[in-house]
Amino acid sequence: MASIPSVDKSLGRASSWMSYAAFAGIIVLAFLPARDAPGGPPAAEKPRSAAVAPQAQKPAPSVATAPAAVPPAAPTNSNVSAATPSSPATGAPVVPNPDVWTPDQLTEGLRSCLQLLAPAGADIALEEPMKRGQCGTPVPVVLRSIGRAEKVEFSPPPTMNCKLAASLSEWIDKVLQPAAQQALGSRIKKIVGTSSYSCRNIYNNPKLTLSEHATGNAIDIAGFITADGRAISVAKAWGPTERDIVAAKKKAVEKAAGKPGEKDKAAGPAPASEASPSIEAAGKKAEAKDKGRVVKTTFKREDGKSPAVKPDAKIQPGPVVAANTKEADFLKRLHGGSCTVFATVLGPEANEAHRDHFHLDMKVRSSGATVCH
């Protein structure tokens, strides 16, 4: 009986060792390479490196790693803030459409326009918002007439921003009508030959900066109609400019310095139509024209002889002086007074480009200075 427990212990140890051996075998089988099952697909094999003969190898050319392709940068827009918002989906910066005003800009533009024009007594028509790059204005208006006391009509009605329209109302009441009453004894009822909005650079020169016309912030005025029916043209009524007077004096000095007694070279009187170079002959243009002009005393008759002209027969043309008419007085009063309202005033004295009109604008300058020529 004493041997039975010993046998039982031996059998228990053998059973435990067999269990450990079976468990170890299962673990080892899991790491053995798979074998193809009959009729089944072959087990996946690791790719083997093919042996390459030394003579078949060619040295690969050294190529620098090319950077990833980068799309071209979008054109810069001076109206876009440096802190550009980003898209919540992609995180890429969102660039506003340069040809569309934002809802906030339109709302602020309308609010400002109502505040400016409500007291001005303006007869206007609202246009669709205009934007083309840096050109345009969120609230363009077509100005038919304006004036607190008495309306002044615009022909044709110009398109402009509300700031300029409000400035014109002040200009009409404080400058235009007083100048007309003092010089002409009549008020102005119509402003003619006007132009305003135009998306362009100054003088249409691509090398110059954007014109104030491009934002509807400038107007050109060519003439006026009085209440008693008189038409006053800037081109005709202003008279000779300072450039014309200087050019005429220079011409007279050159003639006086000429050699007398030479019939064929003697300079005769200037034709009556050229005595007052108020329209075309001014500055360098006048000088260039005179150099190439053949005066009448050098013309020869069909028989080849020069006309009978006495060497001492000199008829001097009348002096070129500033106009002293009522119309000229009105325009010069108007020009001077305009400089108290507008940031820029250019007229016939400025240059040839403004000989026939007044340019008025509300340009904002960092210095706050005005330009008046």
Image (spheres, rainbow, N blue to C red):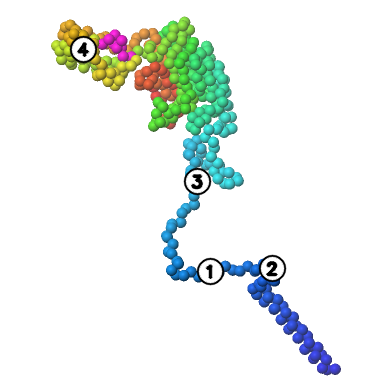
- Between label 3 and label 4, give the one nearer the viewer: 4
Viewer-proximal residue, 278 or 296?
296
Please give the name of the residue rendered at 51% of the width and 22% of the height, measured from the top-left corner: 159
Report how far apart the C-alphas of labels 3 and 4 lie in the structure. 71 Å
Are dots 3 and 1 in contact, CB under 8 Å? no
Are dots 3 and 2 in contact, CB under 8 Å? no
Viewer-proximal residue, 284 or 178?
284
Question: Which mark is on residue 298?
Answer: 4
Report how far apart the C-alphas of labels 3 and 2 lie in the structure. 51 Å
- Amino acid found under the numbered disc labelled 2: Gly
Residue at numbered disc 3: 71
In the image, residue 201 lies at what x, y percent?
Answer: 43, 28
- Amino acid found under the numbered disc labelled 1: Ser
Element type where label 3 sits in the image: loop
In the image, residue 326 lies at what x, y percent?
Answer: 38, 8
Residue at numbered disc 1: 49
Report how far apart the C-alphas of labels 4 and 2 lie in the structure. 119 Å
Q: Quadrant of residue 181?
A: top left
> Does 36 sit left or right of 117 as displayed?
right
